[in-house]
């Protein structure tokens, strides 16, 4: 994980916050965006950490369904709604943000800027999955927030429906034993850990994903409904056919947690097309694009089976995609196998 980066100031050194890190490398407007995401993440982390106590302190449980079905047709969890409302409100307070697009909302939430804020100031659109891994919220397993920042070019929807290569920043916050924000501005990957003073401080820089890793991660209960090439790929991994590497299986069922392990340890996470979800289950704009940018910036790769995820164009803000992401060796091997199968079919 590398040396603990600090900022030398006078005689002493002190930790670098994510806001300072971004301000030193990008615009003040983007640093404010990260400030709002960090502020939301602090409150979400606290809510999740104390969630089990709700009943005891009579606050009522924050666990469970909110009784509303979201645009995905999923039962919204109370924590989904809490995280979504919080991120939206904190980003509304940032002048450089024109609008947000969330997994939980049908369409973009466009912020009406009062007088004194020029339209051009609102240069960003922030796209996010406020709480990823909903099925794990109530069982105290790691969940996360995933975010992507794009430049607004005229219409908000047109701005976010451009290729993933147009992202100016991306990342996620993992709410685990410690809360960690992993992000990229397009020049490498850095991690920030929530400290006792409630700040996200820099704990790793220039993070790289191993070229090949010891784990594959997939919901194998779906394997019978995967295209044959994916079943054959996993069989080959387990049989040690990819350069003799031995593989163990790991699947948490929270994308952020499964990706974070893959970033640190290497290997591959895959959510192939299934009979139930022939276009994949995971969402392109606020799950695949941001994680693909982090993966590539760390020397890894991400494809939809055939294409580089960052070059896939979305037709709608809630588009889904197959996702194969992780170390370059495994992802390239899978892509080659899928392309070969496609050629044979032609
Ligand atoms: P949301 O919780 O944000 O809807 O995310 C989808 C997700 O929970 C991912 O975090 C995870 O990788 C996947 O779905 C798990 O799906 P499954 O239960 O089909 O394995």
Image: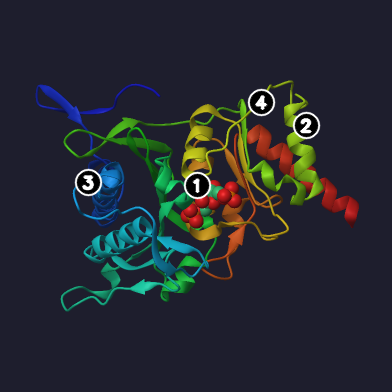
**Residue to which mark 3 is pinned:** 56
Few, some or many C-alpha atoms within 10 Å of disc 2 (few <14, some 14-19, many ≥20)?
some
| Cα distance in 3D space between marks 1 and 2 | 25 Å
| Residue at figure coordinates x 67%, y 34% from the top left | 330
Q: Position of residue 281 (x, y in %)?
A: 60, 57
**Residue to which mark 4 is pinned:** 247
Query: For this rendering, which residue is in front, 68 or 3?
Result: 68
Which quadrant holds the C terminus?
bottom right
State if disc 1 and disc 4 touch (CB < 8 Å). no
Q: Position of residue 95 (x, y in %)?
A: 23, 65
Q: Is residue 126 left or right of residue 29?
A: right
Q: Position of residue 72 (x, y in %)?
A: 52, 66
Query: Which residue is the extreme one toward the left?
Result: 10
Q: Position of residue 215 (x, y in %)?
A: 61, 29
| Residue at figure coordinates x 20%, y 73% from the top left | 117
Query: For this rendering, which residue is in front, 224 or 165?
Result: 224
Marked residue nearer the N-terminal end (3 or 2):
3
Marked residue nearer the N-terminal end (2 or 4):
2
Ligand 1: does it lie within 8 Å of the C-beta at label 3?
no
| Residue at figure coordinates x 52%, y 27% from the top left | 265
**Residue to which mark 2 is pinned:** 236
Is residue 185 at all visible to an observer of this figure?
no
> Circle 2 sits in a helix, a strand or a loop, which is it?
helix
State if disc 4 and disc 2 touch (CB < 8 Å). no
Q: Disc 3 vs disc 2: which is toward the camera?
A: 3
Residue 291 bears which disc, if any?
Answer: 1
| Cα distance in 3D space between marks 3 and 1 | 37 Å
Is residue 243 at all visible to an observer of this figure?
yes
């Amino acid at each position: 994980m590398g040396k603990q980066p600090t900022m030398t100031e006078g005689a002493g050194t002190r930790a670098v916050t994510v806001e300072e890190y971004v301000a030193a490398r990008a615009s003040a407007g983007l640093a404010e965006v990260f400030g709002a995401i960090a502020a939301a993440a602090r409150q979400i982390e606290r809510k999740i950490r104390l969630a089990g106590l709700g009943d005891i302190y009579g606050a009522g449980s924050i666990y469970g369904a909110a009784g509303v079905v979201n645009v995905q047709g999923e039962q919204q969890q109370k924590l989904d709604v809490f995280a979504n409302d919080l991120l939206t409100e904190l980003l509304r307070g940032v002048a450089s943000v024109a609008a947000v697009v969330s997994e939980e909302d049908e369409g973009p939430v466009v912020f009406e800027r009062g007088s004194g804020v020029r339209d051009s100031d609102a240069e960003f659109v922030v796209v996010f999955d406020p709480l990823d891994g909903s099925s794990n919220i109530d069982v105290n397993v790691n969940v996360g927030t995933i975010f992507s920042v794009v430049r607004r070019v005229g219409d908000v929807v047109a701005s976010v429906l451009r290729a993933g290569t147009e992202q100016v920043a991306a990342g996620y916050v993992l709410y685990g034993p410690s809360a960690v924000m992993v992000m990229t501005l397009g020049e490498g990957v850095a991690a920030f850990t929530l400290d006792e003073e409630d700040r996200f401080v820099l704990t790793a820089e220039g993070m790289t994903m191993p070229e090949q890793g010891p784990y594959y991660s997939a919901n194998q209960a779906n394997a019978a409904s995967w295209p044959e090439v994916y079943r054959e790929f996993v069989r080959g991994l387990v049989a040690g056919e990819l350069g003799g590497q031995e593989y163990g299986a790991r699947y948490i069922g929270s994308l952020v947690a499964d990706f974070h392990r893959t970033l640190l340890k290497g290997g591959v996470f895959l959510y192939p097309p299934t009979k139930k979800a022939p276009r994949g289950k995971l969402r392109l704009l606020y799950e695949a694009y941001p994680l693909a940018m982090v993966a590539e910036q760390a020397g890894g790769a991400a494809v939809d089976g055939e294409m580089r995820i960052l070059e896939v164009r979305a037709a709608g803000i809630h588009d889904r995609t197959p996702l194969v992401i992780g170390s370059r060796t495994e992802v390239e091997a899978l892509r080659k196998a899928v392309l070969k199968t496609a050629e044979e079919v032609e």
